Amino acid sequence: MTTNTIDGTLTTQEMFTEEARKWASVVTTKLRANAAKFKHGKENKRTYTAKKYNRKTGETKNATVYEKVLKNAINHKTRKDRDGNLDRISFNFPLHGIYRAFGVGRGQPASGSKKKQALKIRVKRTMSDWISQPIEQDVEKIANIAANYYGDKVLANVWGINYKK
């Protein structure tokens, strides 16, 4: 016996976006928790002046830079395509967060070659997989969320199946 109805609810665009944003919030919380575990780092936000070069005009001017504490500066963003479908989730953090992940910093370069080897290592730095680890732990969840949405979309659009609400 064939049927053209399915019992259940259609995963709508709004439901998909909401679930994906919840997933991103959970991962962001885990990233902040990982960053909070670092023993060395900024206790307070820092403000300093840096020279900025304008390529169009060729001018150099002083600009105020605001650098937040790493754990407080981690955020996520979502982006939608032309059709309004969520197509990207990105995690944002200051540049100094990547140095911790690579185990590099002042006096300790990323490369171990003799040409770039540090003359005097002040702080023993180690790599910390604080960025990839929470994302990898929960990647199956976002994959299932996307599979449910796009699977429902295929059923509804391509085969014209009606859903019972």
Image: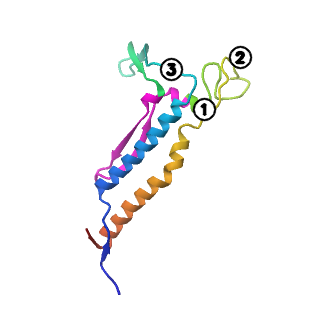
Q: The C terminus is located in which quarter?
A: bottom left
Residue named by callout 3: 42
Is residue 60 visible in the rendered structure shown here?
no
Give neighbour class at mark 2: few <14, some 14-19, many 20+ (Cα, 10 Å).
Answer: few
Residue named by callout 1: 102
Does residue 82 appear to the left or right of 58 in the view shown?
left
x then y, percent, for residue 91:
44, 38
Residue named by callout 2: 119
Q: Residue at x 70, y 22 (%)?
A: 117
Between residue 38 and residue 156, name the one nearer to us.
38
C-alpha span from label 3 to label 2: 25 Å
User: Magenta residues?
Assistant: 71-98
Closer to the camera: disc 3 or disc 1?
3
C-alpha span from label 2 to label 1: 19 Å
Q: Residue at x 49, y 55 (%)?
A: 140
Q: Residue at x 29, y 73 (%)?
A: 161
Q: Residue at x 72, y 28 (%)?
A: 113
